[in-house]
Image (cartoon, grey):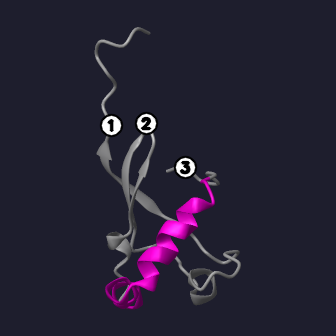
Amino acid sequence: VVRGAVADIRLWDTIRQFAATEAGAQELRKGNHEGVRVQFMRIGYFALDKDAVLPPAALAGGRADDAKLVLNRTVTLKEDAKKEA
């Protein structure tokens, strides 16, 4: 758990793009946030958790002050074994 982590603002762009699709909007209305998947460079792939709070205003492009992003790592990226320390 990393509380107070900082993410690039473009993470919201990805979430909003998902919400803008008909299928994505339906999933988010049902509380199925796991369809939102992102890659953090050199760390791994993550999916939005069902405990995430995505206020409608934030999804519509407004302020995201009341939002709570909860991401679960789904795949860890391996370090290159040949890379020098």
Give 69 or 16, whichever is nearer the viewer: 16
The answer to whether mark 3 and mark 2 are in CB contact below 8 A is: no
Dot 1 amino acid type: Leu
Residue 75 percent location from the top left of the image? 29, 47
Segment colored magenta: 7-29
The answer to whether mark 1 and mark 2 are in CB contact below 8 A is: yes
Which numbered marker is on residue 77?
Answer: 1
Main secondary structure found in the magenta portion: helix
Residue 11 percent location from the top left of the image? 54, 62
Image height of 60 relative to 73, above or below: below
> What separation in Å lies between label 3 and label 2 (alpha carbons)?
17 Å
Residue 59 percent location from the top left of the image? 56, 82
Residue drawn 34% across the image and 80% down it: 32
Badge 3: few (under 14), some or many (20 or more) residues near its Cα, within 10 Å? few
In reply to whether residue 15 is colored magenta, the answer given is yes
- Judged from the image, the secondary structure of the residue bearing numbered disc 3 is loop
Give 69 or 13, whichever is nearer the viewer: 13
What residue does disc 3 label? Answer: 2
Badge 1: few (under 14), some or many (20 or more) residues near its Cα, within 10 Å? few
In reply to whether residue 58 is colored magenta, the answer given is no
